[in-house]
Amino acid sequence: MNQLPLKLPEAFKFSVQFLTRIPLGKHSQYEPDLAAAAVVWYGVVGLLMGSVLAISGWILTDWINLPSLLVAALVLTIWVMITGALHLDGVGDCGDALMGGHTPERMLEIMKDTNCGIGAIVSVTLLLLVKFSALIILLEEGSWYLLLFAPVMARVILTLVLLYLPYLRSNGLATQLHSHLNAKEIITAGSLLSLSLILIWFQGFMVALIASGVGYLLIHRSLIKPLKGTTGDIYGTVVEVTEAAVLIGLVAAL
């Protein structure tokens, strides 16, 4: 990985293609070292996603003058489409695990099950309902620009979880990714994450920071601590719950 600086442009393209459905040229072939280098850009990709959401809210509200309820539904639809529901799948699996798993071993087994149980349906539905309700309030207050925060903070937290917490699976894409992360990438990731935070340093930053911390603590207590590590499903849940927590925090601060 001593060629990390040379990989940064290609890694940015891979991170956009991996985390979003935003078209960005020919799809990059998966390589563990490229996937590890792409972690550097997660915060910046979150900034890109937040910009799309904020601009969409602005256009639909101020230019087209649609009602806030409809704009909230459309923005949430765009949000899900941007990610391809990548992280919602993790929320569903973790919801099933929390509802039906009474031991760590059973929870991990349920997460691997491709069937969708009642826990998945309830958790995904409630999470989307929270996001939708928060979006309505933010848009009614003309605070569409605050939509920038949630995707950024969620991917900042995701990056830190990837870098510093153990991964539980012995196989899979994330296992390969972890084996290719090193100290140099951690330093570079930290620098770019700091840059992405500086770019959004205006009213609401501290609220978003605190809310994202609360969201993470909720996941840590209910999933990471009992399991003593993370999985791909927990990564998705970290993103979605952090986004919802940030939206709640921003609404509370209005």
Image (spheres, rainbow, N blue to C red):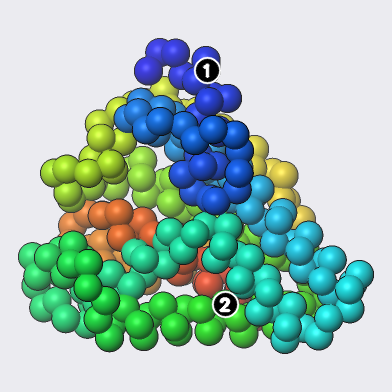
- The residue under label 2 is 131
Please give the residue where the numbered disc 1 appears in the rendered image.
5
> Vertical placement of 117 versus 54: above or below?
below
Q: Amino acid at mark 2?
A: Lys
Q: Is residue 62 above or below residue 230?
A: below
Pointer 1 local density, CA inside 10 Å: few below 14, some 14–19, many at least 20:
few
Amino acid type for the residue under numbered disc 1: Pro
Q: Nearer the viewer, residue 161 or 118?
A: 118
Asked if residue 26 lies left or right of residue 104, the reply is right
Q: Is residue 215 visible?
A: no
Assess disc 2: are there few (<14), some (14-19) or many (≥20) residues with their C-alpha within 10 Å of its C-alpha. Answer: many
Q: Position of residue 149 (x, y in %)?
A: 65, 59
Split into 4 quadrants, where in the image is the N terminus? top left
What's the mark number on residue 165?
none
Q: Which residue is farthest front?
A: 26
Where 94 sits versus 168, above or below?
below
Where does the image place residue 187, in percent across and percent down from the top left? 46, 28
Q: Nearer the viewer, residue 107 or 183?
A: 107
Residue at horizontal 17%, vertical 43%? Answer: 171
**SS for tag 2?**
helix
CA distance separating discs 2 and 1: 37 Å
Query: Could you tell me residue 224's position as x and y percent?
Result: 26, 61
Question: What residue is at 64 percent from the left and 38 percent from the top?
Answer: 195
Residue at (74, 78) in percent of width and height: 71
